[in-house]
Amino acid sequence: MRFRLTPEILLKAYMAGIFPMAESADDPELFWVDPERRGILPLDGFHIPRRLRRVVRQGRFTIRVDGDFTGTIAGCAEATDKRPNTWINDEIVRLYTGLHTRGFAHSVECWDGDALVGGLYGVAIGGAFFGESMFSRATDASKVALVQLVALMRQGGYRLLDMQFVTPHLKQFGAVEIPRAQYRRLLADALRYRCDFPRGLGGSGEGGDGGAGTTGAGALAALQPSKVTS
């Protein structure tokens, strides 16, 4: 009989420092990943490029938290010219949708009117957020969602933003690689905290109802004094 992974087992895996992936969206199997060097984005060293700061300030997107988790993970699974293959298969969708219904997986979304144009999703346990994937159908949408995520994490008292692997895209925001042993120490510390993932940014004039949507400009105030780079 084939073993069936459950959302509860998946939570324990994250707490142990491992996560699942698939070879491709068409491959029904999953395998566990435990990198020797782990990508994280230090919350106190988050870099916002100057051009992106202007985009966030302009408020061209409406940002929602958990407004359409299903649509967000579907967007991340889409094949594009820049990303012809993804690792998000049906089993990944089933498991993370299960985590979402249990309150452990969240999406941060960028909307243009009634259209979902970008966003990201991940898993929140204790004081750690494990970023899984992001997508853009409009220029800068996923970047704006990342800015909002970091602002929400700071507001919620989170300690660790796990990015799994460092890419050139993430390096511009301050992502770094650390050894497995160091990552596990940071993870153990973060799991000691009990944080609630915010639905929106409070005290910024933007409100706290993530379902209703905000412009995202309040993230800049919440992120002061984040580093600004050219």
Image (spheres, helix red, strand yellow):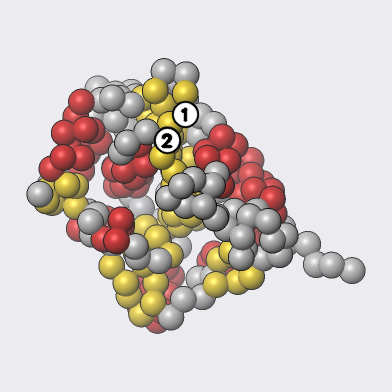
**159 is higher (above) or lower (below) than 196:** below
| Left or right for 185, reference 124 | left
Q: Secondary structure at mark 2?
A: loop
| Left or right for 25, reference 131 | right
- Residue type at mark 1 is Leu
Q: Nearer the viewer, mark 1 or mark 2?
A: 2
The quarter of the image holding the N terminus is bottom right
Residue 194 at least partly seen: no
- Residue type at mark 2 is Arg
Q: Residue furthest right?
A: 1
80 vs 60, nearest the viewer: 80
- Rendered location of residue 134, percent (x, y): 44, 47
The residue labelled by disc 2 is 137
213 vs 110, nearest the viewer: 110
Residue 222 at least partly seen: yes
What residue is drawn where x is 64% and y is 40%?
A: 101
How far, Cα to Cα, is label 1 from label 2?
8 Å
- Rendered location of residue 148, percent (x, y): 32, 39
Q: Earlier in the sequence, mark 1 or mark 2?
A: 1
107 vs 172, nearest the viewer: 172
What residue is drawn where x is 49% and y is 45%?
A: 80
Residue contact at pointers 1 and 2, CB within 8 angstroms: yes
The residue labelled by disc 1 is 116
